Image (cartoon, helix red, strand yellow):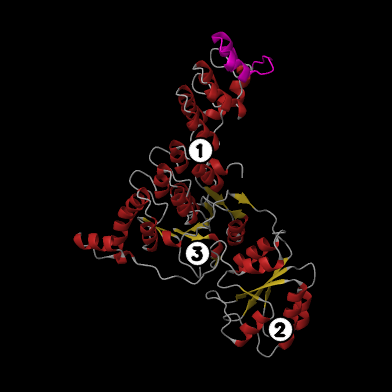
Amino acid sequence: MKHYDKYDGFVVLHGTDTMAYTASALSFMCEHLGKPIILTGSQIPIFEVRSDGRDNFLSSLIIAGTYPIPEVLLCFNEKVYRGNRCVKSDNSSFSAFSSPNMPPLVRLEIDIFVDWPAVFYTGETEKFRIHTNMCQNVGILRLFPGITAQTVRAFMQPPMQGIILQTYGAGNAPTNRADLLDVLEEACKWGVLIVNITQCSRGNVNAAYATGVALQKAGVILGGDMTTEAALAKLSYVLGKGDWSMEKRKKMLGQNLRGEMTTVAQETLSFMDHDLIESVAQTLHLSTHEEVNKLKDALFPNLMCAAAKNSDIPALEKLIEAGSHLSAPNQDGRTALHVACHSGDLRLVQFLLNNGASVHVRDYRGDSPLIDAIHAKNLDIIYLLVQTGAVIPWSKSAIALHLCSAAALNDLNTIKAWHAAGADLNSFDYDYRTALHVAVTSNRKDVAEFLMKNGAHCNLQDVFGLTALTIAQKLGYTELLSILNPDGHLCVEPIENLLSCNHTSSL
């Protein structure tokens, strides 16, 4: 958690036997995730000559560091899957994992193909956090011909709180076993949450058959096409939410929380349905799907930025329907969110965030959308981005240069913007001068007062051994002295402390 803001993505090396369970669990535990977390491993130990571990590891690093996919992923054998959609299906080949009900999100071939429309976005504007209270009183019960009601009842006894029920086919139980239905209904009334998933490797459960309807009426929750690993992790996660009511827990089990289950798909436009793409493709005599995909990758980011510049939300909606990825950067690395933040359009920024735009993408200068919002001095947008998990991607020394410049120019609004974004007002430049040093030297009373009220220290020494307080004394700025030292006590922070506490973190 403490390292989340320092990196663009994370790679976890893991044993293959339980990797699908870990990937599913992490997908639920990591709430409001905005960066990729990729699990990978190998079938042959990495120190062996023929190990697949090196390729898997390098592929994971490339995806984690290059593609802003805000999901828990699993990378194996040149494919990247959604973590909570995977199962280990083969223990003797390099294709150890499969995703029965969903294609890979990424294919690593000569080119890297990312299925951006399939990437899952929560559309929530909250900071990343980790939920660790996972309920352990859960289990898996697999139906089989001849299972007794006594066996099922014994399995349901306390402290059991939740059960994954693996049924036949599309979610069916034996049609002539009323005793089983009675036990399941009884357990549901006790407060045991039961989720119905299929024993088949592919497909989903539904209430199309009589026994499926009977199970649902008994209180059993339909699990859609979730894998066993995902269903178990989701059940543990939901039961661990102590502040949720029983009704909310049941509701959440039936909803798609992390892309773990397929929901009814809405009809979307194909790439060729977009008039502009079709016209350009015809002009360039493009015909294959691959060629049109490359055209889309080249044009859509610029179209998104142009629509954002004009605050044209209907155009953005059409581009999203046509398969455009909101966080796809143009040739300068800028996204629609960069442009919206630069223009100061709060409504547009909210729209983009609600549709999954990433706050972590950096342009060719290394600037994130938060930097554009700071330059625009729009506090509402800054607060919204920070709430969503944005952090300043610059070093403290780089921040200090801008703070000092703003202080010299008496630009209080810029300093307020940096402060709202989370900047340390005691950051120092190459001469160990802070914004307060510059504000005092330039006799900027309003700036100095704001800095002091928001945590700036007047006793930090610069490279010449001067503090903001001693500068005010030497220059005879009495009003500033009353702001800096209202009690009349002079205290100097030794430069050794400054170097040990701040200098290292600014590098």
**Relative image position of residue 143 (x, y in whole percent):** 67, 79
Name the front one of labels 1 and 2.
1
Q: Identify the residue position indicated by label 2 in the image.
A: 181
In the rendered image, the vertical position of residue 62 relative to residue 276, given as above or below: above
Q: Tell me the distance, in whole angstroms, between the alpha carbons under discs 1 and 2.
A: 56 Å
Is 243 on the left-hand or right-hand side of 415?
Answer: right
Picture residue at 68% right of the left edge, 53% below the top: 132
Badge 3 amino acid: Ser
Q: Which residue is at the front of the view, 49 or 464?
A: 464
Name the front one of labels 3 and 2.
2
Q: Tell me the distance, in whole angstroms, between the alpha carbons under discs 3 and 2.
A: 41 Å
Mark drawn on residue 392: 1
- Secondary structure under tag 1 reads loop
Asked whether residue 19 is drawn in magenta, I would say no
**Relative image position of residue 66 (x, y in whole percent):** 43, 48
Q: Earlier in the sequence, mark 1 or mark 2?
A: 2
> Count of labels shown?
3
- Secondary structure under tag 3 reads loop
Q: Is residue 301 visible?
A: yes
**Can you name the residue that lies furthest to the bottom here?**
176
Q: Which residues are magenta?
A: 468-492
Mark drawn on residue 153: none
Asked whether residue 482 is drawn in magenta, I would say yes
Badge 1 amino acid: Ile
Q: Which residue is at the front of the view, 318 or 59?
A: 318
Badge 2 amino acid: Leu
- Secondary structure under tag 2 reads helix
Q: Earlier in the sequence, mark 3 or mark 2?
A: 3
Q: Tell me the distance, in whole angstroms, between the alpha carbons under discs 1 and 3.
A: 44 Å
Q: Identify the residue position indicated by label 3 in the image.
A: 93
**Relative image position of residue 451 (x, y in whole percent):** 57, 27
